[in-house]
Image: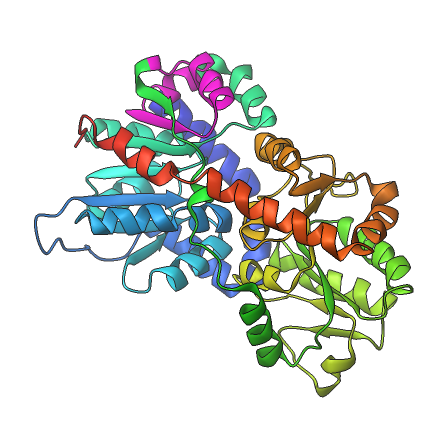
Amino acid sequence: MQTFYSIVYTLAFILASPYWLIRGFFNREYLRTLRAKFIGPGKVLPKLDDRKRIWVWALSLGEVLSARELIRDLLNQGCEVVVTATTLSGLNSARTSWPTLAVYPSPLDFNTSIRRFLDLVSPDMLILVETDIWPGILLELKNRNIPKVLVSARLSPRSFKNYKRIGFFWKKIIRLFDRIASQTEEDRKKFMVLGIDPDKITVTGNLKFDQPPAPAGAQEKAAILQETGWPDGRWLVAGSTHMGEERLILNAFAQIALKIPSLKLLIAPRDRHRFSLTWRYILQSFPNLSAKRSQPQPSDAQARVFLLDTLGELERYYSLAEVALIGKSWPESHQTGGHNPLEASVRGKPVIAGPKIQNFKWIYQALVQAGGAKIIESAALATQLAQLLASPQTTLEMGLKAVDFVTSHRGSVKETLKFINQPPIF
């Protein structure tokens, strides 16, 4: 099986190589990261004592953020932690979050890349956060008798369908995990369909609920406005937007802003490569009333639409919002499925999202039921946003309910570590 997978993976990588090379040509940091994925850390990471070395693998920015409290507790238990991330945004966030830890790009799934990484890092256990299951790495860890745990595990409908399509293969891969801690009972059942032993999986909740309590909203907002020179007022923050959603949100804002002169809009695209295109959209709609975070100007104090074109700051900038819009959820997006609403919710912000939120289905359903969020269709976005903004008391109450919702679901880190350690597997 390992040989067959290696052949398929190599062929897929060769076919995709023009994309990697073109992207690397325009982004040298990406090219350097890709090289590190091939060859690993470059030198042996020495073990200075007899502490257990835990390899925590987080795919992207969202997984890195959700792993913060888990890593803190692992360090408090006396473990040594090595962190890897797959995407550039995740890697940069990890380096900022843990400047004293070893942080590396996640290895590619080639046999040589995997073996070199494991030889240099020598982990005692892998903890994989949420997703990004790579068969080659799991197979090599099995060969070395290194325990493998999947935490805060979830399977989107699309991923589950794809795994079932070649179930003869994925059932063998899923069984390689020593334990799986799933987010919901629905996720647990999906993994059991894929072949995991019921004794090896339990529901421990979503690590994203255990993020640290947010700083006082008014103080954080004041600090951001002082740092940026942006004007005070009422703010909409549209976070993690995807293709097509920026135009939808700009059009809705243009209608609402006519009635609320103090209203401002901040747009934060999910992907770095969309910054320039989104800026173009903003200039087309508000040519003399626009500003972007990376290039402050004296005129920013008079702007009404702002672009957050820096990475790793969105979580904090939700503090500006009276209402938070979460992207990848409207049909205008080329890839729907939703993004995590909890970063806004923990800051007491009412959440607005489109109907395509299947990747976070349970969270949105529960948050709506708790009164902290609304799902709004594209055609009704301007109208319903205007109605919500017309009642500041309603937005305040929704925000308080959102905080209560997050608080009531804390405890996943504790349950996850308990599941890993009892009985110990390493």
Q: Quadrant of residue 415?
A: top left
On the image, the x and y values in percent for residue 177 come to 32, 25
Number of numbered labels in the structure image: 0
Residue 5 visible within the image: yes
On the image, the x and y values in percent for residue 8 come to 46, 28
Q: Nearer the viewer, residue 126 or 75?
A: 75
Magenta segment: does it hold 196?
A: yes
Q: Residue at x 34, y 54 (%)?
A: 104
Q: Quadrant of residue 261?
A: bottom right
Which residue appears farthest toward the bottom when viewing the image?
298
Magenta segment: does it hold 189?
A: yes
Viewed as shown, does residue 197 lie left or right of 362?
left
Viewed as shown, does residue 156 lie left or right of 140?
right
Q: Is 78 located above or below residue 301 in the figure?
A: above
Residue 18 visible within the image: no
Quarter holding the C terminus is top left
Viewed as shown, does residue 219 lie left or right of 103?
right
Quarter holding the N terminus is top left
Which region of the structure is painted magenta?
170-198
On the image, the x and y values in percent for residue 45 come to 19, 55
On the image, the x and y values in percent for residue 92 come to 45, 60
Q: How is the image coloured?
A: rainbow
Q: Nearer the viewer, residue 406 or 140?
A: 406
Q: Residue at x 73, y 81 (%)?
A: 301
